[in-house]
Image (tube, rainbow, N blue to C red):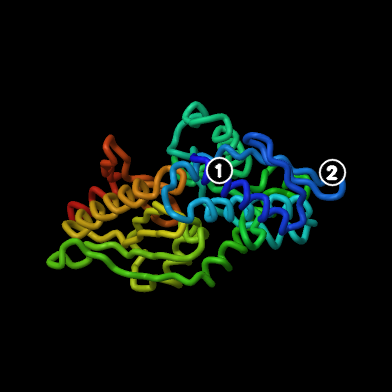
């Protein structure tokens, strides 16, 4: 990062946090926030923020990244002071990558701070949704959401009870979500070979697979879920979905969805993507049916059920 952007970053951090009542101290790659008492001190590492800005050439990248950083920090601060009723109101379920930058172990982290991010996500996880996606608990503080550590939640109430509340809150979010729905087809001569593309202004859209049948019934009623659904969540505000049909149109649709998911995820970059894979939902069960190969390619791996549908059986 050049000196001009570094100066802009310092100024944005100083003005942003002072505006929320904090005293600000910058020391190397560490930001220390304090109020009147020592107990209110918050220490924030800046490596992720600096790496993100350095990789973003957009004209207003510093302001945009800093705004997100400030909102996330304020969300953590607010979450730390929630009472039990506030926790119940704020909990949501979301889907997060099992490993930022792609599935793998902690050695896949590019630097120590990213390894810490992996641990934070895992601490908020209640289990795998797919091989590369974790179902996680977050506390929604309005401007931003912050991962909720299950160990800390267990001190408040039974975690299963809290998860049910988070699921109800997510259902409410998804039902009220404003989305744009469009249908894209790569071959007009093959009816039903396309994919429904759903865009939204909320990252909760990527959690729709957790309540997929309910979401599709409400927002894409044209889709028939009886034989199953294919879906992909390449980005936080982007969902691809189509019904399981048969034969050539299913083959075309699978190819289009896998190609689109990989392209969207690759275009956004590893830090912004959710999952480049295609998944099959059937009777409430989810199975991953595509993999990413070298050079942003993909490999479709249909299970026995999809093979029968592809063969028209």
| Residue 95 in picture, x, y percent from top left | 51, 50
Frontmost residue, 216 versus 198: 198
* Residue that protrudes farthest toward the left in the picture: 189
| Residue 87 in picture, x, y percent from top left | 73, 57
Q: Which mark is residue 64?
A: none
Does 46 sit left or right of 202 as displayed?
Answer: right
Q: Residue at x 55, y 40 (%)?
A: 48
| Residue 151 in picture, x, y percent from top left | 71, 41
Decide: few, some or many residues near mark 1? Use Cα within 10 Å; few <14, some 14-19, many ≥20: some
Mark 2 or 1: in front is 1
Residue 20: in sight, yes or no?
yes
Does 113 sit left or right of 251 as displayed?
Answer: right
Q: Which residue is mark 2?
A: 39
Q: Is residue 73 above or below residue 131?
A: below
Residue 75: in sight, yes or no?
no
Instruction: Give the position of the C terminus as an image quadrant.
Output: bottom left
* Residue that protrudes farthest toward the front in the picture: 4
What separation in Å lies between label 2 and label 1 (alpha carbons)?
29 Å
Kind of element beneath mark 1? helix
**Quick one: label 2 or label 1, which is nearer the N terminus?**
1
Kind of element beneath mark 2? helix
| Residue 126 in picture, x, y percent from top left | 59, 44
Q: Which residue is mark 1?
A: 6
Does 192 sit left or right of 265 as displayed?
Answer: left
Q: Is residue 69 above or below residue 51?
A: below
């Amino acid at each position: 990062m050049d000196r001009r952007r570094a100066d802009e970053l310092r100024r944005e951090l100083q003005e942003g946090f002072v505006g929320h009542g904090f005293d600000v101290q910058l020391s190397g790659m560490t930001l220390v926030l304090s109020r009147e008492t020592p107990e209110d001190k918050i220490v924030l590492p800046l490596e992720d923020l600096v790496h993100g800005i350095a990789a973003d050439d957009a004209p207003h990248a510093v302001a945009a990244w800093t705004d997100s950083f400030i909102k996330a920090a304020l969300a953590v601060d607010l979450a730390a002071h929630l009472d039990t009723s506030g926790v119940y109101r704020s909990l949501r379920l979301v889907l997060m990558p099992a490993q930022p930058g792609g599935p793998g172990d902690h050695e896949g982290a590019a630097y120590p701070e990213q390894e810490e991010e992996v641990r934070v996500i895992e601490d908020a996880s209640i289990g795998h949704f797919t091989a590369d996606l974790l179902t996680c608990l977050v506390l929604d503080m309005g401007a931003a959401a912050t991962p909720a550590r299950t160990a800390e939640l267990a001190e408040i109430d039974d975690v299963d009870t809290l998860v049910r509340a988070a699921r109800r809150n997510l259902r409410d979010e998804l039902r009220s979500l404003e989305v744009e729905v469009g249908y894209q087809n790569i071959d007009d001569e093959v009816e039903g070979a396309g994919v429904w593309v759903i865009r939204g202004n909320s990252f909760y859209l990527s959690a729709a697979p957790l309540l997929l049948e309910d979401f599709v019934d409400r927002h894409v009623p044209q889709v028939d879920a009886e034989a199953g659904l294919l879906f992909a969540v390449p980005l936080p505000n982007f969902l691809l979905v189509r019904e399981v049909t048969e034969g050539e149109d299913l083959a075309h649709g699978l190819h289009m969805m896998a190609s689109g998911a990989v392209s969207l995820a690759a275009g956004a970059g590893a830090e912004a993507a959710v999952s480049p894979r295609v998944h099959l939902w059937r009777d409430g069960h989810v199975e991953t049916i595509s993999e990413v190969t070298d050079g942003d390619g993909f490999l479709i791996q249909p299970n026995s059920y999809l093979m029968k549908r592809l063969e028209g059986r």
